Image: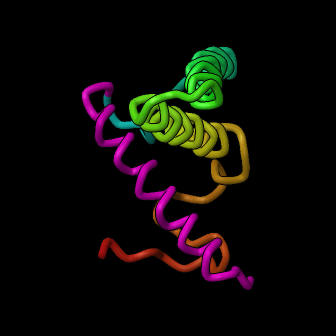
Amino acid sequence: MKLYIQEEQLVNQFSSMMKFEIGANHYKGNMVEWSPDAFELISETSYHLALLHRALLAVEQGGSYAARHEVDEYSADVANLMAKICLTFGSLKLHPVGHDLSSNKQVSDS
C-alpha cells in the first residue's frame, strides 16, 4: 500500500495523539480488556462525538487554542472508540492484538 509522505506523517501524528489519550484515560482501566456491549459503545461514541462537535463549532466560531486542543483530544478519543469497536465487533476480534494484519506477523514490542 502506498501513502503520500504527508499522509504517512498525518497517520503517525494522529496515532501518537490516540496513544496519548489512552494513557490519559489509563485510570479507567485497560481498554483492550474492557468488555462493552454494543449499546455501551454506541453511548460512549455518541457522547464523545457530541464533545467533538461542540469543539469543532467553537473553532469554527473563532475559538481559542483550548478549543483546538479539545478537537485533538476528542478526535483521538473517538478514534480509540472506533478501534475498540473493531476489536470487539469487527475483524480485529478474529486476530490477537499484537499481530500485523497486513502480513499476519507478530509485531515486536519495540
User: Can residue 79 be seen from the camera position used here?
Assistant: yes
Q: Is residue 61 above or below residue 75?
A: above
Whether residue 20 appears in magenta in the rendering, the answer is yes
Name the main secondary structure of what is drawn in magenta: helix
Which quadrant holds residue 79? top right
Residue 87 appears at what percent x and percent y?
60, 45
Is residue 108 toward the left or the right of residue 43 in the image?
Answer: left
| Residue placed furthest toward the left | 27
x 52%, y 69%: residue: 99
Q: Nearer the viewer, residue 43 or 14?
A: 14
Query: 82 or 101, which lies in front?
Result: 82
Q: Within the magenta stretch, is there residue 17? A: yes
Q: Quadrant of the N terminus?
A: bottom right
The region drawn magenta spans: 1-28
Residue drawn at x 30%, y 76% as measured from the top left: 110
With respect to residue 85, does 27 lie above or below? Answer: above
Rendered residue at 63%/18% (across/down): 50
Left or right: 4 in relation to 63: right
Toward the viewer: 14 or 83?
Answer: 14
Q: Is residue 97 left or right of residue 43?
A: left
User: Looking at the picture, does residue 58 appear above or below residue 30?
Assistant: above
Q: Position of residue 107 (x, y in %)?
A: 45, 75
Total labels: the figure holds 0
